[in-house]
Amino acid sequence: MAKFETATFAAGCFWGVEEIYRTTNGVKETVVGYIGGHTETPTYEDVCSGETGHAEAVQVTFDPKQITYTKLLEMFWSLHDPTQFNRQGPDVGSEYRSAIFYHSETQRESAQQSKKEIEKKLGKKVVTEIAPATKFWKAEEYHQNFLMKHGKNLC
């Protein structure tokens, strides 16, 4: 029986990020939701107000025998601009911040090393937050697999 692991990434609008991870070999499940805030059971409207402190994020369940956490981190860096503070493209607010929420000490160390490497590669400051994973609140059902259901890229 496979032992799966969990990774949680915030890289702006969660729809596009979810779609990329969802279609990656070794990823068993993706769930979009909210993490890193202080409000219990936040809704999309609550999070978009900027008052909850949550980020839109994707929780990825993966088989480390098929895909490594390091590879998931590489994908994370390529999916957004980690030098933009509290925004990605037209989406502005702390809910669109760049963040890696780690689930183990090994993930924390890998994320920190990876951040140093991408900062060196880009030649500028990376604002990505690296923080312990807290309670992950699943987003409303209409957000789950949004791009797969609607067949278009709205991010």
Image: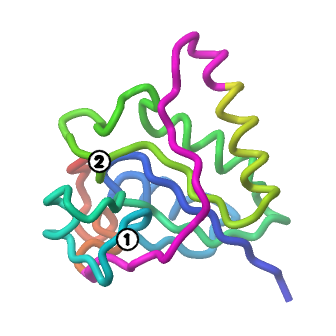
- Mark 2: give few (<14), some (14-19) or many (20+) Cα within 10 Å: many
Residue type at mark 2 is Ser
Q: Which numbered disc, 1 or 2, marks the residue that appears first in the sequence?
A: 1
What range of the chain is rendered magenta?
Answer: 118-141
Quarter containing the N terminus: bottom right
Q: Residue at x 28, y 67 (%)?
A: 146
Residue lying furthest bottom: 1
User: Which residue does the numbered mark 1 point to in the structure image?
Assistant: 33
- Mark 1: give few (<14), some (14-19) or many (20+) Cα within 10 Å: many
Alpha carbon distance from label 1 to label 2: 14 Å
Residue type at mark 1 is Gly
Q: Is residue 126 left or right of residue 121?
A: left
Q: Residue at x 45, y 73 (%)?
A: 31
User: Which residue does the numbered mark 2 point to in the structure image?
Assistant: 94
Which percent across, then down, holds residue 70? 75, 46
**Which type of secondary structure does the marked residue at label 1 adopt?**
strand
Which percent across, then down, holds residue 92? 20, 40
Answer above or below: position of 155 versus 101: above
